[in-house]
Structure formats: C-alpha cells, structure tokens
Image: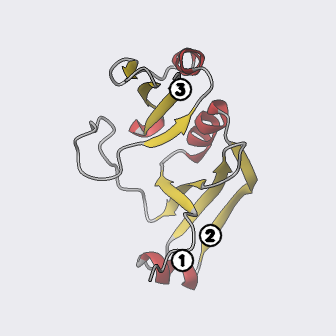
Amino acid sequence: MSHIRRFDHVGITVADLDTAMAFFVGLGLEVQGSPMVVEGEFLDTVIGIPGSRTRIVMLQAPDGGTTLELSSFVRPDPVPGSPDAMANELGLRNVAFEVDDLQAAVDGLAADGYGLVGAIGEYEQAWRMAYVRGPEGIIVSLAERIG
C-alpha cells in the first residue's frame, strides 16, 4: 500500500530569497501568493530547530503540477552549502524543467550572469539538455524535446 497521494513540492533553502525568486520567475515560474514569514511552535516542531523563523515563497510552472518552495532563514543564520557542488556530490543536485527553446533559455540566463555547468548535450535525437548554475550554486536542468 502506498502512503503517497501525490508529489507536492521541492524545497530549496537560500540565503537571498529575492534573488532566487527573480531567477526562477525569469525562467517562467509563477509566484503563488506573496512571500510569507513562518515561525512559532509548528515550524520549530517540524524542522527541529527551536526559535526558527523563515521567509518562504511558492512558485509553480505555468502548467501547474509540483511546486517549488524557496525558503530563507531569518533565524538561525543559514549554514552555507557548497555553491560549486558538481552532479556527483551527494544530495539534491538539480531541479529540472522542460523548456520550449533551450538555446533561448540558456542565452537569457547568460545575460543575467548565470552560466552553463558543462555544455548543451543531445540524448538519442530526442532531447537537448543543459545544466545551468543559478543563484547560490543551485543547478537547474533545462531540457528541450527535439524528437
């Protein structure tokens, strides 16, 4: 018996919520509601950090489905991760999106100062894909269906 009903969201903790939110909005995600502050007994209990306070915002692709939660801790101070982590480093390594025009998406992100991790690759004449390193080292996988 499965305990899972549906895939709800992926959460990413960032130091600069506004910069990360602008990055994902620039890719085409839509902000769901306004950024909000969460604190108190509920948060302390769930995450196991007493006295915590965080700002969060939820974003969603235009087609709906799974959402992306961006969270920035006000307290305690955020603990830095490895902004240069490569794909083989253990842990969550990328967030993936299908795009209509991979080159246009990559060019747009490059204009904002975000570069490729490697290069654009093609898989079995079906997909073109690239990893882009976004704010705070977040790797975003962008894929265009070509087959």
Instruction: Please state which of the two labelled residues, at mark 3 or mark 1, is closer to the viewer.
Output: 3
Viewer-proximal residue, 40 or 12? 12
Q: Position of residue 36 (x, y in %)?
A: 69, 61
Q: How crowded is mark 3: few (under 14 residues within 10 Å), some or many (20 or more)?
A: some
Judge whether 57 appears above or below 106 on screen: below
Residue contact at pointers 2 and 1, CB within 8 angstroms: yes
Q: Position of residue 128 (x, y in %)?
A: 45, 22
Q: Where is residue 117 in the image (x, y as percent from the top left)?
A: 35, 25
Judge whether 5 appears above or below 13 on screen: below
Viewer-proximal residue, 131 or 70? 131
- The mark that comes first in sequence, 3 or 1, is 1
From mark 2 to mark 1, how far is it between C-alphas?
7 Å
| Residue sitting at x 39%, y 37% | 137
The secondary structure type at the circle numbered 3 is strand
Q: Residues within 10 Å of mark 2 (few under 14, many from 20)?
A: some
77 displayed left or right of 98: left
As drawn, the label of residue 43 is: 1
Q: In which quarter of the image is residue 38?
A: bottom right
Q: How many labels does the image show?
A: 3
From mark 3 to mark 1, how far is it between C-alphas?
38 Å
The secondary structure type at the circle numbered 2 is strand
Q: What residue type is labelled 1?
A: Leu
Residue tagged by mark 2?
38
Task: Look at the image and tell me in which quarter the N terminus lies.
Answer: bottom left
The secondary structure type at the circle numbered 1 is helix
Residue contact at pointers 3 and 2, CB within 8 angstroms: no
Judge whether 71 appears above or below 82 on screen: below
Residue tagged by mark 3?
144
| Residue sitting at x 28%, y 38% | 87
